[in-house]
Image: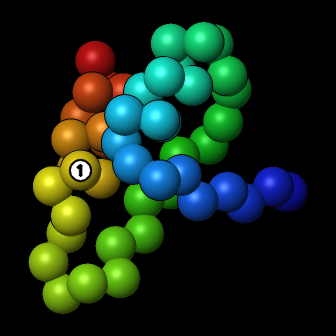
């Protein structure tokens, strides 16, 4: 199991475009979900 924190949603989308395979788990530690994390999840569902 490899756990990796990426700096931003754009990096995640670049890796997806490159064809990397992964399981995506978005963990939001703040009281409100981060817009970047939610945007990345929505983009990957398309």
Percent position of residue 28, x then y: 34, 73
Residue drawn 81% across the image and 55% down it: 2
- Taking the view exactly as shown, the residue that stands out farthest to the bottom is 31
Residue at far right of view: 1
Quarter of the image with the N terminus in it: bottom right
Check the image and report above or below for 35 versus 41.
below
Is residue 9 left or right of 4 when viewed as pictured?
left
The x and y percentages for residue 27 are 42, 69
Tag 1 secondary structure = helix
Viewer-nearest residue: 18 or 25: 18
Question: Which quadrant of the figure contains the C terminus?
Answer: top left
Please name the residue shown 27% across and 27% down the image.
Answer: 43
Circle 1 residues within 10 Å: few <14, some 14–19, many ≥20:
few
Asked if residue 18 is positioned above or below residue 38 in the image, the reply reads: above
Give the residue pinned by disc 1.
36
The image position of residue 36, as x and y in percent, is 23, 50
């Amino acid at each position: 199991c490899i756990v990796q924190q990426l700096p931003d949603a754009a990096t995640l989308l670049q890796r997806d475009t490159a064809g990397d395979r992964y399981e995506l788990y978005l963990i939001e530690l703040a009281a409100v979900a981060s817009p970047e994390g939610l945007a990345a999840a929505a983009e990957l569902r398309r």
